[in-house]
């Protein structure tokens, strides 16, 4: 092959120069193209900003115009509700009037304070325990009136009224303990009138095993000779095992031990994390005053100074501890837990530390729970006030919930809580628990006694029990199911932030108006949204059919609704697609209420006018709508799912 002629230096330089010019032209072309693209992108961005600004202006104008419509509709709804509630209130007031009750009207602070003052002033220094307990029972009737008022305040969202009720509820229950203390002081002062056994010991008990308040007392009528003692108050089912250290740390005292059980506790919800269930047992070590003496026909008795009528001895006694008694032996306590309380297989028992206002488990060991006898027993290194405790948020968060119409103006609400799946029926009469049918919950689910023939669904013919939403949920809390969470409970849950109050109020109010005709279900994306936004899914269900909201095949049958503090809209979100698709559904815009989203639907159906007419709230539907709203609001369904 012929040899390739070698390029000259000039040829190589010309080729390099030509390549450099070509590269330069290419770079200039790319630069101009990029400038054109940047200019086009900036133009598009400017147009989008202008369009977004225009849309915001249009939205603001639209919402402002619609607010008048919403205010008028909500005002009419409130007028209907006030009218219906006034009729119910008249019936309640008439029933109270014909009952001729002498209890104070808890609506008025002056009557409550007068009642408390009168009870204190009328209290006699010689009052028997039986009389004190009867007064406590009367006081609990006033407490029940306050609880009724408290539940109404919860339903109306009146926080100030709730705190007011709880303040006086606590004051009256403190008064009950004062009455028992005064009767105990009188008992100790005249203890020699009681008939002791051969070991100079006094056993006394008041009440029965299932009473809301019961008292047991044991006294040793000599200051020495005390040994380890087992005390069994069989009538009230309270037992104590006292070590010899009790006497060693109370040298010089004739000692008595009082056991006071009440279905309420003295903590009154002060601990933000723990809550008590099953009542409180207060075990106090008492000093028996010197006995009276007979001198020349006279009976001489030492009268304690005012305020020192009842001397409670600490155990362990850290002030007078000697080397031999430095380690206080534990005491054993057992008592019966009411039948309506849900107790876990491994319960926790705590004592109330008033110095820090918290429940504490320090020094409590060997806790045993007997399901059949419903007895809890434990060892404690101190004598104090004890209760079974659990975390306030033990049933949170909700895994999912859904609501479906099952009859005219009746819906079924299913909530999968952390421990149980709960089913409720909501009607214009209020709320009732449908399941689970646990033995502890039967008294919440059904009325006591036998019902009439027909319409019976409970055990032994008992009628279903319907209460106002807050009343029934408060009863469940007494059973150990806290389904009325506070915003502070979210602090104990990872990744949960309470929804904005106005967003919740908007959602609950609007959703309650469609609950009779639509399935409403929670969304898995709701938790991840900011506090100002909340997401639910709805599906029309005029025929009261049963759909599974968790079925992936039916995901597209639900429409996602996004709520804001002042508006709502349809969005493109689907359960099976993450992250949440927050863009509005095609053709839809935001509106000031859900009703207007239906009214302004871009593609209304043939029965559009009839649908809108059904969704209007009237005097015949307002009680049902309000019961749904209250239930959703009290359970904070959007904040804890």
Image (spheres, rainbow, N blue to C red):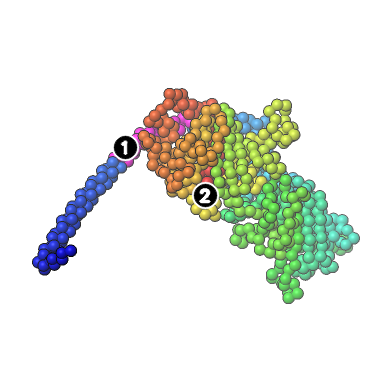
Left or right of residue 487: residue 247? right
Q: How many marks?
A: 2
Identified at 72% across, 61% down, the residue is 366
| Horizontal side of residue 407 vs 20, given as left or right | right
Q: Is residue 637 part of the magenta span, yes or no?
A: no
Label 2 sits on residue: 487
Image disc number at residue 462? none
Corner quadrant of residue 98: top right
- Residue 116 in picture, x, y percent from top left: 65, 47
Residue stretch rendered in magenta on the structure = 54-77
Can you say which quadrant of the picture contains the N terminus? bottom left
Looking at the image, which residue is at 63% across and 50% down? 171
Badge 2, how many Cα within 10 Å: few under 14, some, many 20+?
Answer: some
- Residue farthest left in this picture: 10
> Is residue 444 found left or right of 233 in the rendered image?
left
Image location of residue 118, percent across then percent down: 67, 46
Q: Which residue lies at the image location 65% right of the left edge and 48% below the top edge?
A: 480
Q: Could you say which quadrant of the image residue 112 lies in? A: top right
């Amino acid at each position: 092959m012929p040899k390739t002629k070698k390029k000259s230096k000039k040829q190589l330089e010309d080729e390099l120069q030509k390549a450099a010019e070509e590269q330069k032209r290419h770079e200039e072309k790319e630069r101009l193209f990029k400038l054109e693209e940047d200019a086009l992108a900036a133009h598009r961005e400017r147009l989008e900003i202008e369009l977004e600004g225009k849309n915001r202006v249009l939205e603001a104008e639209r919402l402002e115009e619609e607010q008048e419509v919403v205010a008028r509709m909500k005002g009419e709804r409130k007028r209907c509700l006030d009218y219906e509630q006034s009729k119910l209130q008249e019936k309640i007031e008439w029933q109270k009037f014909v009952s001729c009750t002498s209890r104070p009207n808890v609506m008025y602070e002056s009557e409550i304070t007068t009642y408390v003052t009168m009870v204190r002033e009328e209290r006699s220094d010689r009052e028997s325990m039986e009389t004190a307990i009867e007064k406590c029972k009367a006081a609990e009737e006033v407490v029940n009136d306050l609880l009724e008022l408290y539940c109404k305040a919860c339903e109306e969202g009146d926080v100030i009224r709730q705190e007011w009720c709880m303040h006086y509820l606590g004051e009256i229950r403190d008064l009950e303990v004062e009455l028992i203390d005064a009767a105990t002081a009188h008992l100790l002062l005249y203890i020699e009138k009681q008939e002791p056994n051969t070991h100079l010991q006094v056993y006394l008990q008041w009440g029965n095993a299932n009473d809301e308040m019961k008292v047991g007392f044991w006294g040793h009528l000599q200051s020495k000779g005390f040994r380890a003692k087992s005390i069994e108050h069989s009538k009230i089912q309270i037992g104590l095992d006292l070590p010899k250290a009790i006497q060693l740390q109370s040298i010089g005292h004739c000692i008595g031990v009082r056991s006071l059980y009440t279905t309420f506790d003295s903590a009154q919800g002060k601990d933000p994390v723990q809550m008590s269930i099953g009542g409180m047992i207060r075990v106090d070590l008492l000093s028996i005053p010197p006995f009276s003496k007979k001198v020349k026909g006279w009976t001489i008795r030492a009268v304690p100074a005012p305020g020192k009528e009842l001397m409670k001895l600490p155990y362990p006694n850290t002030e007078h501890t000697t080397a031999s008694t430095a380690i206080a032996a534990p005491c054993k306590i057992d008592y019966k837990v009411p039948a309506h309380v849900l107790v876990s297989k491994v319960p926790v028992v705590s004592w109330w530390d008033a110095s820090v206002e918290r429940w504490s488990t320090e020094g409590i060991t060997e806790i045993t729970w007997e399901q059949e006898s419903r007895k809890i027993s434990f060892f404690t290194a101190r004598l104090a006030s004890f209760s079974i405790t659990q975390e306030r948020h033990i049933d949170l968060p909700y895994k999912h919930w859904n609501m479906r119409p099952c009859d005219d103006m009746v819906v079924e609400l299913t909530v999968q809580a952390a421990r149980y799946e709960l089913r409720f029926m909501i009607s214009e009469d209020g709320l009732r628990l449908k399941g689970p049918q646990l033995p502890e919950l039967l008294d919440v689910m059904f009325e006591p006694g036998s019902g009439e023939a027909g319409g019976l669904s409970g055990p032994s013919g008992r009628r279903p029990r319907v209460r106002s939403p807050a009343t029934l949920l408060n009863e469940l809390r007494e059973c150990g199911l806290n389904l009325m969470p506070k915003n502070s409970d979210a602090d104990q849950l990872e990744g949960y932030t309470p929804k904005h109050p106005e967003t919740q109020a908007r959602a609950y109010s609007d959703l309650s108006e469609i609950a009779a005709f639509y399935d409403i279900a929670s969304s898995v994306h709701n938790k991840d949204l900011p506090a100002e936004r909340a997401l639910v899914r709805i599906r029309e269900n005029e025929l009261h059919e049963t759909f599974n909201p968790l079925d992936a095949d039916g995901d597209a049958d639900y429409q996602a609704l996004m709520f804001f503090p002042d508006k709502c809209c349809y969005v493109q979100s689907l359960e099976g697609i993450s992250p949440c698709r927050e863009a509005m559904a095609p053709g839809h815009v935001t509106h000031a209420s859900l009703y207007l989203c239906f009214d302004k639907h871009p593609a209304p159906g043939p029965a559009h006018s009839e649908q809108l007419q059904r969704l209007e709230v009237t005097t015949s539907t307002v009680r049902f709508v309000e019961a749904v709203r209250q239930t959703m609001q009290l359970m904070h369904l959007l904040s804890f799912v």
